């Protein structure tokens, strides 16, 4: 990333994820999906702070594992709702363990896995929004914020630290997506409702 200024800005803006996660936790919904989601967003911020701040030898694990886990959680949550089935938490709880050897294999492997998880999360969220009109606006606004952040993240200039902007917009997008997390179409024995998490 672009030098001292860029790293300093990225370290500070990592806290946007922490703020977003705490806002989710402080929200009106206190169900298990919201709590899990909020904690995962906080973990992303703390991992990002470790990477862009002190940058210890294990920073890749602190940074990449929470991101991958959050993406898997979002994908599993959207799939559970879209297909009206309770999906085992194992679908996302296995990800942190699988990411350990992936991160150890190097940044290319980790980036590929995170990209695949991001594609699954975005695709499933948009598919859920397609069939759930009441979630459509929230999902689209979140997707626009996160996509805008990703585009700005490609900017590498000292006056416009793109990665720092990515942090802020991605955190805002994750906060905006929170009301969709744990939502289910219909209650029932095959649907976990507020018990998922």
Image (tube, rainbow, N blue to C red):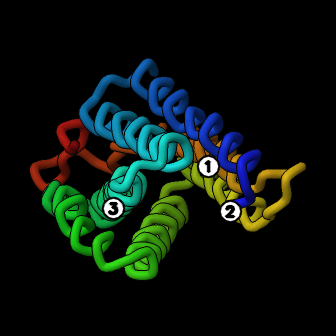
**Labels 2 and 3: the sequence-earlier one:** 3
**Labels 2 and 1: the sequence-earlier one:** 2
Which residue is situated farthest in the right direction here? 159
Query: Looking at the picture, how far across and down is residue 64, in whole percent?
Result: 40, 59
Residue at 38% x, 24% y: name it: 29
Judged left or right of residue 157, residue 46 is: left
Q: Is residue 160 above or below residue 150?
A: above
For the residue pair 20 and 85, the one nearer the viewer reads as 20
**Label drawn at residue 72:** 3
Mark 2 and mark 1 in contact? Answer it, CB < 8 Å.
yes
Judged left or right of residue 104, residue 191 is: left
Q: Which residue is mark 1?
A: 170
Query: Looking at the picture, how far across and down is residue 1, in whole percent?
Result: 67, 61
Which residue is situated farthest in the left direction here? 189
Q: Is residue 189 above or below residue 21?
A: below
Query: Looking at the picture, how far across and down is residue 174, in whole percent?
Result: 54, 45
Q: Which residue is mark 2?
A: 150
Q: Quarter of the image holding residue 74? A: bottom left
What secondary structure is found at the residue carrying circle 2? Answer: helix
**Label drawn at residue 137:** none
Q: Report how far apart the C-alphas of labels 2 and 3 lie in the structure.
A: 18 Å
């Amino acid at each position: 990333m672009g030098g001292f200024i860029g790293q300093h800005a990225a370290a500070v803006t990592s806290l946007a994820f922490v703020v977003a996660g705490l806002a989710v936790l402080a929200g009106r919904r206190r169900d298990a999906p919201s709590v899990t989601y909020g904690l995962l967003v906080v973990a992303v911020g703390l991992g990002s702070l470790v990477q862009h701040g002190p940058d210890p030898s294990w920073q890749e694990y602190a940074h990449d594992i929470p991101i991958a886990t959050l993406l898997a959680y979002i994908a599993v949550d959207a799939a559970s709702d879209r297909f009206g089935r309770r999906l085992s938490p194992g679908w996302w709880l296995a990800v942190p363990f699988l990411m350990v050897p992936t991160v150890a294999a190097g940044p290319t492997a980790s980036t590929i896995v995170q990209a695949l998880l991001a594609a699954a999360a975005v695709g499933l969220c948009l598919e859920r929004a397609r069939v759930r009109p009441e979630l459509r606006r929230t999902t689209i606004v979140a997707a626009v914020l996160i996509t805008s952040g990703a585009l700005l993240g490609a900017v590498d200039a000292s006056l416009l630290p793109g990665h720092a902007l990515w942090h802020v917009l991605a955190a805002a997008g994750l906060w905006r997506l929170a009301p969709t997390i744990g939502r289910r179409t219909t209650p029932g024995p095959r649907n976990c409702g507020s018990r998922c998490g």
